[in-house]
Image (cartoon, helix red, strand yellow):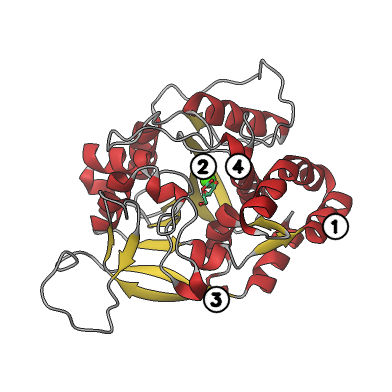
């Protein structure tokens, strides 16, 4: 199985992805690292510990960054994921179990160095922890198997942004960190809104999970009630987007995704702050801000039906 460090900000769709990773035989979860995003880092870390305890996960949890590199204000996502980050589902105040003593970026460095060539970093929140790890130990770029992220939007199928018309939340929350990740010479695969917003978990789909998916299925139903209402109001969608799980699905079933290669930049200031732009490899341009940057692949399309079936069957 592929060894995974799951860098996450649980978060309703993060929790769904975590349960999927734990259940997927092709994936071996070796660590969970937390970051601010869908809540403050105290909240997302508490939620990660809760999920570990409730679902008996063996992987350690290491707490990460509480703010972006860029010094931006931390935006509140309570209107999307609920004030407690898990759709208001009640979580006991005291959760048994201890955190790993290391900060997340140090945990990442140590684990990558302990398993050279074997670790996939699966990052589905702000990319701050990964950027801190890379700044502290740039050699990890050549020691990871690869990096798979949920983030960004590139205009395929009309998908361009969810916090502004051009910016996706994980990138907008720390554009500087994301630009550093895309600037490094490791293999990065980017699963953005272009495919995650095509992967709609309808109310009927979630109800079937509740009825047939055991404890995990029931839990997914409960935490998604608030999230579903938000998306209905914000986008008119009849269900919730499978953002974070889609990045995990890519690792298990890459054949379900179409990809395009080329260097990627993130807009780090101005009204388009947080926008992700890939220069296609298939065209020649004059020297520009993309020149000399490594090529990474972005997902441009997904077989959503199969991806959703994979999630359902795995849960
Ligand atoms: C991303 O933002 C967060 O709210 C979700 O968990 C997901 O990672 C979607 O834009
Ligand atoms: Ca997330």
| Sequence-earlier tag: 2 or 3 | 2
In the figure, is residue 204 to the left or right of 17?
right
| Sequence-earlier tag: 2 or 4 | 2
Label 2 sits on a secondary structure element that is strand
Labels 4 & 3 near each other (Cβ < 8 A): no
Kindly identify which numbered label has been placed on residue 216. Answer: none
CA gap between label 2 and label 4 equals: 28 Å
Q: Nearer the viewer, mark 2 or mark 4?
A: 4
Q: Residue 289 in the image: x percent, y percent?
A: 16, 64
> Mark 1 packing: few (<14 Cα in 10 Å), some, or many (20+)?
some
Distance from mark 4 CB to nearest ligand 1 atom below 8 Å: yes
**Displayed quadrant of residue 238:** bottom right
Kindly identify which numbered label has been placed on residue 255. Answer: 3
Label 1 sits on a secondary structure element that is helix
Labels 2 & 3 near each other (Cβ < 8 A): no
List the residue tagged with mark 4. Answer: 80
Q: Nearer the viewer, mark 2 or mark 1?
A: 1
Residue pictured at 40% horizontal, 42% vertical: 173
Residue pictured at 24% horizontal, 59% vertical: 185
Determine if residue 102 is in view: yes
| Sequence-earlier tag: 2 or 1 | 2
Residue pictured at 69% horizontal, 60% vertical: 311
Residue pictured at 27% horizontal, 38% vertical: 70
Label 4 sits on a secondary structure element that is helix
Q: Height in image: 174 above or below 280?
A: above
| Sequence-earlier tag: 1 or 4 | 4
Of the 4 image quadrants, the one containing the N terminus is bottom right
Labels 1 & 4 near each other (Cβ < 8 A): no
Kindly identify which numbered label has been placed on residue 30. Answer: 2
Labels 3 & 1 near each other (Cβ < 8 A): no
List the residue tagged with mark 1. Answer: 208
């Amino acid at each position: 199985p592929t060894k995974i460090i799951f860098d996450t900000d649980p978060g309703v769709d993060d929790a769904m992805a975590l349960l999927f990773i734990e259940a997927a035989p092709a994936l071996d979860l070796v660590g969970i690292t937390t970051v601010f995003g869908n809540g403050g880092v105290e909240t997302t870390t508490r939620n990660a510990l809760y999920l570990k305890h409730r679902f008996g996960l063996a992987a350690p949890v290491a707490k990460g960054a509480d703010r972006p590199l860029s010094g931006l204000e931390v935006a509140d996502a309570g209107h999307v994921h609920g004030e407690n980050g898990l759709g208001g589902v009640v979580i006991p105040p005291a959760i048994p179990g201890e955190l790993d003593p290391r900060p997340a970026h140090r945990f990442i460095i140590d684990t990558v160095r302990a398993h050279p060539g074997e670790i996939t970093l699966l990052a589905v929140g702000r990319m701050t922890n990964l950027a801190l790890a890379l700044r502290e130990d740039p050699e990890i770029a050549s020691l990871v198997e690869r990096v798979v992220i949920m983030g960004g939007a590139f205009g395929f199928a009309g998908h361009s942004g969810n916090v502004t018309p051009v910016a996706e939340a994980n990138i907008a929350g720390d554009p500087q960190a994301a630009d550093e990740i895309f600037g490094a010479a490791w293999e990065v695969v980017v699963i953005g809104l272009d495919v995650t917003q095509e992967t709609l978990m309808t109310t009927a789909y979630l109800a079937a999970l509740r009825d047939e998916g055991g404890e995990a299925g029931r839990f997914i139903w409960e935490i998604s009630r608030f999230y579903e209402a938000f998306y209905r109001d914000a986008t008119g969608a009849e269900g919730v987007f499978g953002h974070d799980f889609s990045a995990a699905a890519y690792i298990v079933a890459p054949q379900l995704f179409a990809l395009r290669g080329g260097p990627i930049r993130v807009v780090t200031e101005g009204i388009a702050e947080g926008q992700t732009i890939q220069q296609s490899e298939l065209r020649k341009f004059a020297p520009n801000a993309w020149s000399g940057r490594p090529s990474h692949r972005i997902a441009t399309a997904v077989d959503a039906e199969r991806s959703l079936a994979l999630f359902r069957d795995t849960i």
